[in-house]
């Protein structure tokens, strides 16, 4: 049965407007974004099939675009709509963080790194640049590696900090294994970064390790 033949209060778009987005299931929210289904499959059925194929919503949204493009019903316009929604979510988190005045604390900064790095298939090293009042100046993914490690070059981190005129930075990287346990290599990189940044009077406030729905702070562990 086509969605247009459903009772009005059960159609995803009408349901969203009447009861709010939180009342919709993952499949129904996807249906609102996808707008239409495919032959023999409503938009809600399509959303449900995509979720089943990927495993869950997060797994679906973490897929790289080239992998999404191969899924039935996610070509062309539907794919661009979904990718745009994901990016809007990330930008919303970034704008919220710009309002924070306590980015020197690990919790608000970790939200940014979790949003940007969780689900990356390989290790990614990123930097959050801040002014002297701990307000966000920028966020950049600087280095990418294999599933095991990313080569981090302190000189490049220093160069970008100076380009942003940053007074302090927080760095972070993900562990594709999903386990947010800092390694000896993470501790060594932190020490090298501290030494390099001290030469240009930029403070390294923290180094965050991002896992699967978890994170750890080397600052909190006393490793800075």
Image (cartoon, helix red, strand yellow):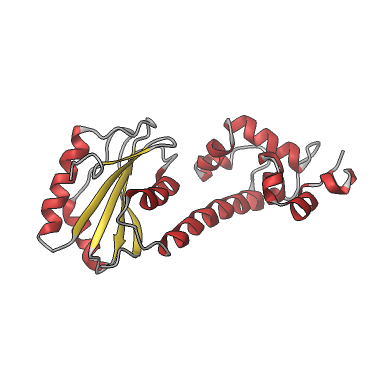
- Which quadrant: the N terminus? top right
Locate residue 220, reporting x and y percent. 26, 43
Closer-to-camera residue (96/70): 96
Q: Residue at x 37, y 48 (%)?
A: 107
Q: Looking at this view, is 170 or 27 the one in front?
A: 170
**Residue 76 located left or right of residue 36:** left
Question: Is 162 located above or below residue 90 in the figure?
Answer: below
**Spot occupied by residue 74 in the image (x, y as percentages of width and height):** 64, 43
| Residue visible at 77% across and 47% down in the picture | 12
Out of 23 and 139, give the one closest to the viewer. Answer: 23
The residue that appears at 68% across and 41% down in the rendered structure is: 73
Residue occupying the point 21% across, 54% down: 204
> Residue 218, position in %: x, y?
24, 42
Q: How many labels sit on residues?
A: 0
Residue 212, quarter of the rendered image = top left
The location of residue 222, given as percent across then percent down, is 19, 41
């Amino acid at each position: 049965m086509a969605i247009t033949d459903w009772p009005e209060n059960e159609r995803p778009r009408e349901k969203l407007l009447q009861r709010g987005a939180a009342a919709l299931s993952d499949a129904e929210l996807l249906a609102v974004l996808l707008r239409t289904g495919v032959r023999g499959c409503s938009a809600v059925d399509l959303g449900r099939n995509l979720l089943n194929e990927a495993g869950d919503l997060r797994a679906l949204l973490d897929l790289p675009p080239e992998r999404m493009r191969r899924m039935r019903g996610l070509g062309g316009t539907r794919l661009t709509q979904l990718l745009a929604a994901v990016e809007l979510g990330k930008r919303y988190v970034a704008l919220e963080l710009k309002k924070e005045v306590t980015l020197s604390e690990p919790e608000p900064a970790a939200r940014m790194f979790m949003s940007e790095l969780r689900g990356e298939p390989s290790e990614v090293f990123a930097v959050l640049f801040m002014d002297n009042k701990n307000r966000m100046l920028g966020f950049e993914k600087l280095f990418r590696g294999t599933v095991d490690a990313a080569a981090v070059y302190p000189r490049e981190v220093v160069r970008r900090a100076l380009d942003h005129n940053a007074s302090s930075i927080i760095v972070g990287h993900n562990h594709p294994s999903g386990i947010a346990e800092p390694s000896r290599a993470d501790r060594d990189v932190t020490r090298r970064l501290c030494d390099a940044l001290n030469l240009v009077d930029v403070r390294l406030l923290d180094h965050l390790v991002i896992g699967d729905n978890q994170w750890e702070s080397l600052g909190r562990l006393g490793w800075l």
